[in-house]
Image (cartoon, rainbow, N blue to C red):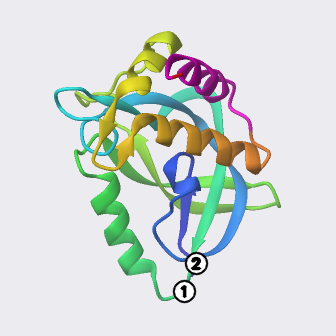
């Protein structure tokens, strides 16, 4: 049986595992937002950055990519995803149903935010997000790189996120 992973942030442009197939997909009941502070990958404990997470929101839907893992790489992929995504336990791993734009649904490994975790920061104003993203740097590089890559890859596949587009423009203006 094919293992699927739902990508909505850095997994779009840096899955870190062999992908057999990519499908535009929708995850109902969740919204993509910069609702998680990053103290490892895109910030530090002293100067946290922000990363995207899926926040459970009634009547919301997140467009992203369902990634089919190449056969024979499932076990290693799951181990590496857990090492990457569950570094601080702010994300929770769930098997959720996503609807493929090509028709049908699949169950995909999906990482969603734990709204009770100390790193949860949902509802932060966009301007405040921009100020943080413009200057934060972590173990995987600048927070700006994460924002720009995610927004550009969403755009490349025909998906637009108004908040990410606004943040990209604003952060570029702040960093000129």
Would residue 87 be found to the left or right of residue 74 on screen? left
Q: Quadrant of residue 118?
A: top left
Query: Residue 92 at x, y = what percent?
Result: 34, 47
Q: Earlier in the sequence, mark 2 or mark 1?
A: 2
Q: x, y (%) of residue 3?
A: 53, 73
Residue 143 among magenta residues: no
Residue 81: image x %, image y %? Answer: 37, 63
In which quadrant is the C terminus drawn?
top right
Residue ranking furthest to the right: 102
Query: In the image, what residue occupies the spot 67% across and 27% down?
Result: 165
Q: Which residues are magenta?
A: 160-175
Residue 21 vs 98, above or below: the answer is below
Task: State the mark number for residue 137.
Answer: none
Task: Report the magenta stretch's main SS.
Answer: helix
Residue at mark 2:
2
Question: Image quadrant for the N terminus?
Answer: bottom right
Q: Nearer the viewer, residue 62 or 141?
A: 141
Position of residue 117 relative to residue 173, above or below, is below
Q: Residue at x 47, y 34 (%)?
A: 144
Residue 24 visible in the shown view: yes
Residue at (76% x, 51% y) in the render: 157
Extreme-left residue of the structure: 46
Q: Foreground: 116 or 170?
A: 170
How far apart, in angstroms, are the residues tagged by discs 2 and 1? 7 Å
- The image quarter in which residue 117 lies: top left
Residue at image coords 34%, 53% = 85
Q: Which residue is denoted by mark 1 in the rendering?
A: 71
Question: Where is residue 62 shown, x and y percent of the image?
Answer: 63, 39
How packed is label 2: few (under 14 Cα within 10 Å), some, or many (20 or more)? some
Contact, mark 2 vs mark 1 (Cβ under 8 Å): yes
**Left or right: where 147 falls relative to 135:** right
């Amino acid at each position: 049986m094919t293992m699927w992973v739902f990508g909505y942030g850095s997994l779009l442009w840096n899955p870190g595992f062999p992908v057999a197939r990519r499908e535009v997909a929708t995850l109902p009941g969740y919204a993509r937002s910069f609702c998680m502070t990053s103290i490892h990958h895109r910030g530090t404990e002293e100067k946290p950055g922000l990363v995207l997470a899926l926040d459970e929101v009634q009547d919301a839907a997140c467009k992203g990519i369902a990634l089919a893992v190449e056969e024979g790489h499932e076990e290693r992929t799951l181990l590496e995803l857990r090492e990457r995504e569950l570094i601080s336990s702010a994300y929770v791993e769930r098997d959720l149903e996503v609807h493929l734009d090509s028709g049908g649904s699949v169950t995909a490994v999906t990482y969603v935010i734990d709204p009770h975790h100390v790193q949860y920061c949902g509802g932060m104003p966009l301007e405040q997000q921009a100020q943080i993203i413009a200057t934060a740097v972590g173990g995987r590089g600048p927070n700006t790189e994460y924002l720009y890559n995610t927004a550009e890859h969403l755009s490349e596949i025909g998906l637009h996120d108004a908040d990410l587009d606004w943040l990209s423009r604003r952060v570029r203006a702040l960093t000129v």
